[in-house]
Amino acid sequence: MRTFRSLLFILLALVATVACKQKPEEGPKEKMAQEDLPIKVEGEEVRYATDSTEMRGYIAYDKNLDGKRPGVIVVHEWWGHNDYVRQRADMLAELGYTAIAVDMYGDGKQADHPDDAGKFAMSVMSNLPAAKARFNAAMELLKQHKTVNAEHLAAIGYCFGGSVVLTMANTGADLDAVAAFHSGVQLPVPPNEDLKAKVLVCNGADDSFIDPASVTAFKAAMDSINASYEYISYPGVKHSFTSKEADANGKKFGLPLEYDKVADEKSWQELKDLLAETFLK
């Protein structure tokens, strides 16, 4: 009887020991399952203002991602704050950033014709103090967002928006990186020692809106200050190559616009690499 009781005691002790060893192994598995949540992009309509202008924007972020993350400002084409710029904000949110699609014209104003778009864009680029005020108002709103690490900021822009983010960077804006797509580089503020950001420019080699002489001057200015930059020119690619609306707009208004899927995807990868290099080291 004593032998049986001794064996039973030993057996129970072994079972208890094995059970205790298994518990710590289950914890990380359960935690991993909890952390491995699907991407869930949350979009927020926002309003912000300068002393003279009220603007409508859109903030996108992954609701299931914990902690603060870098913020990215997205500036629209000359058409104004539309669905396209919001889609780009959503795409950045899917990558783990918080993005604000800004409104540089005020009150969410959009252009239906290139003549109006040109006038709207010129009204901003010819009034640098107003442009800075609108850009900075959006940047401050982004900094204050609950998901944003205000020390890590970037800005990207398309067409008119590309010129805006390059100009803001040249004025010394507190940005770690900027990227411009199918963007002019003849800017109201040329590259100078105030530039802090890494710079990426992705343009089409056959973009008739971009003067080759301006590209040469831009590169020379960037080289003169030892700027950290990359200028990529895609052979055979025309203006507005990242927008799927380009072909329809080009046909409608008789403009040399054309979507290019390969250049679009390549330039987006270049952006992803820039942001990862800047923020994920």
Image (tube, rainbow, N blue to C red):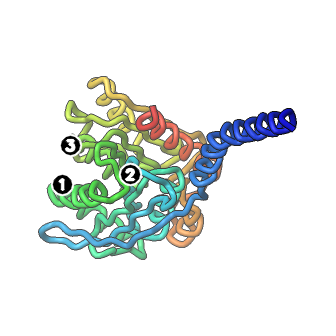
Residue 50 percent across, percent down from the top left: 17, 66
Mark 1 touching mark 2, by CB under 8 A?
Answer: no
Residue 219 sits above or below residue 161 on the image: above
The kind of residue tagged 1 is: Leu
Quick check: can you spot residue 80?
no
| Quadrant occupied by the N terminus | top right
Counting from the top left corner in percent of width and height, residue 237 is at 58, 47
Residue at (23, 44) in percent of width and height: 173
Q: In the rendered image, which quarter contains the C terminus?
A: top left
Q: Secondary structure at mark 3?
A: loop
Which is more foreground, mark 1 or mark 2? 2
Rounded to the nearest whole Å, what is the CA distance between mark 1 and mark 3? Answer: 10 Å
Q: Residues within 10 Å of mark 3 (few under 14, many from 20)?
A: many
146 above or below 119?
A: above
Label 2 or label 3, whichever lies nearer to me, is: 2
Residue placed most toward the observer, 176 or 236? 176
CA distance for labels 1 and 2: 21 Å
Nearer the observer, 128 or 82: 82
Counting from the top left corner in percent of width and height, residue 187 is at: 28, 45
The residue located at (41%, 46%) in the rendering is: 180
Closer to viewer: mark 1 or mark 3: 3
Q: Position of residue 37 (x, y in %)?
A: 59, 56
Residue under label 2, please give it.
72
Q: Amino acid at mark 2?
A: Val
Give neighbour class at mark 2: few <14, some 14-19, many 20+ (Cα, 10 Å): many
Please give the name of the residue rendered at 54% of the width and 60% of the height, measured from the top-left corner: 243
Residue under label 1: 128
State left or right for residue 10 relative to residue 36.
Answer: right
Q: Earlier in the sequence, mark 1 or mark 2?
A: 2
- What's the distance in space between the residues labelled 2 and 3, CA to CA? 18 Å
- Give me the residue at 35% from left, 43% from top: 185
Q: Specify the label residue 171 is tagged with.
A: 3
